[in-house]
Amino acid sequence: MCRIFGSFAVAATGPELATVSARQRHGGPDERGVLAGRGWSLGCDRLAVTDPTGGSQPFRLPTAPGVTAVLNGEIYNHHELRRHLTARGHHFPDACDGSLLPALYAEYGAAFANHLDGMFAIAVVDLRAPLPQLVLAVDEMGMKPLHYHQGPDGAVRFASEIPALLAFDGVPADPREQTLDTVLATKTPFGTETALRGIRNLPPGATAVARGTEGLRVLRRPPRQAAPAPATGVLDTLRREVHRLADADAPICAITSGGLDSGLVTALAAEHTAPLHTFHLGYRGRWPDAEHTHAKAVARRARTVHHQVDVDPAEFASLLTRTIRHLGQPNADPITLSTYALFRAVRGAGFTVALTGDGADELFGGYDRVRAALAAPEGTDWTAAYVDALGAAPRLMREWLYTPDYRAFIAEHGSAADRITAELRASRADRVSTLTGFETRWRLPAYHLRRVDHLSMASAVEARMPFCQPAVTAVARGLPAEQRHGKRALYEAGRDLLPQAVLNRPKQPFTLPLAAMLVPGGPLFEPVRELLTPSRLMRTGQLRPERVQALLARHAERPSHQDALTLWALAVHELWTEVIQGLRVSVGWAA
């Protein structure tokens, strides 16, 4: 697991590359490696997990001359691939998973990623042909992000994190005008566009190729075909993947929220790893919706060594700034604070690898908005309510908060919510496939996987997600439609593994009690009020300050989850805007 960066069809100086590296070194503190040539560079900040004594990057092999590669992630089938490549005459200096990449590329060219099972973002420079070539590839689910900027002259610059990418000369830090509406409508940007003009994400399952100064050509690799599978196949498949991902050359633990998804991962990991350490996050004081009793019940049933991490809410203001810096984009879900604090505690306890339950809700139809959409009668328009549920503020609230000029701008250019609605209505698939397809293809990578990657690596922790493994996603997609409603297949899988109290409890997201904390005297009220002062809001001309103040006063008098979430999203966007401005002049920051 590492942070990678590089450039192609453009020169990059040593000091420039050092600054890029410094801005994401928190994710790869063990070793820094950079190689550069005429018109190209590749770099890596390494978090040593697989074969820690080997695996120095960038990777080169005598049997693959002219090919250089860097890897962020894990290749879980590297033993099988190494045997195959050894039989074809390649030799490897160590047992690191990424060491085989130059050989794999030499054998298969840009199609090399079709042979990989894992989570990865990879960059390869091929200097063998008269016209040099850059190849970028990310895994099928988008677990490992790769951000890039392409100049008008064909120059390509890329990095694992946006703040690092902004350290390259020629990469601007210009917020897109639509970003405020996107934050309120979908909480964070979906798809390949980011909150910054000219910076894009490589989409899940994509391979991008640049030759000479032609610029990147992005292609989606064919998805793995899902075969029909009975519900009983879910547990066996998940067990196999959890056990496989629990093998690591570094200390490993599990994140246990107290819910079904992380509980299943915990119970199955405990079969393989003994003693398994588990971590659960809570907050000092008495707050609603605490889950620590459920997490402890899962831990007792699985016989793990359980760690209850209690964060002081007084720390949230500083945590908010740190999470926004690490994410590089606004994310309006307060779960970001919890995620950052949890992985910081995991690393502080000496663990480098953590198993999580992310991805289950998207694959198995677990969200309330999905259930409501599936329950809507045939012939009714379920899309509007579903899309509103994705956001931090419903459409009418957004339009009420905007200035007339900004409302007209969004009407002319379109909202992210409008694009999602149009895509859902245009789908010819059944409703279950339409919803799970959107959730896994667009929301999961942008909303969950990017957050987990950036905020775990902020503390140099590798998060592994068994539900996102190709074998599990294939089984989920092959289930009958009724087994993908409300995670029925997962409840059946957990029947003999989890306490009844966990199986029977209502679904609850892993987050913090925002409405209760964002009241006068609460730990979040003053930080949010300070970020939403009229003088700050008037600078962009997008919001009506008097209406934001009215919303804040209404929530202070009659707290509600919806008002709290809208206020939080506005504050996150404002702070992100200030952080981005700071990146124009700063070199780095403390994690």
Image: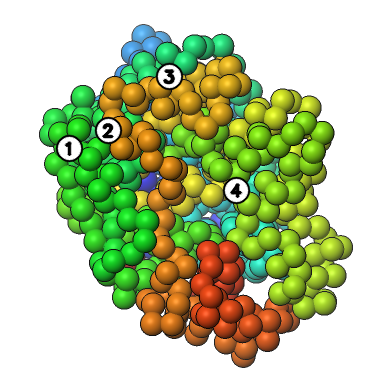
The residue under label 2 is 499
Asked whether the viewer can see residue 536, the reply is no
Q: Which mark is in front, 3 or 1?
A: 1
Residue 296 horizontal side relative to residue 421, left or right: left
Using the image, determine if residue 384 lies above or below residue 312: above
Q: Which residue is mark 1?
A: 300
Q: Position of residue 76 (x, y in %)?
A: 36, 26
Q: Which residue is mark 3?
A: 234
Looking at the rendered image, the quarter that the N terminus falls into is top left
Residue 402 makes an appearance in the image? yes
Residue situated in front as seen by the camera: 485 or 239:
485
Q: Mark 2 and mark 1 in contact (Cβ < 8 Å)?
A: yes
Q: Amino acid at mark 4?
A: Asn
- Give the mark, 4 or 1, whose residue is nearer the N terminus: 4
* Disc 4 and disc 2 in contact, CB within 8 angstroms: no
From the image, tell me which residue sits under label 4. Answer: 201
Residue placed at 73% from the left, 53% from the top? 417
SS of the residue under disc 4:
strand
Left or right of 32? Residue 192 is right
Of the two numbered discs 3 and 4 on the same chain, state the one appearing first in sequence: 4
Residue drawn at x 71%, y 67% as measured from the top left: 398
Say whether marks 3 and 4 touch (CB < 8 Å).
Answer: no
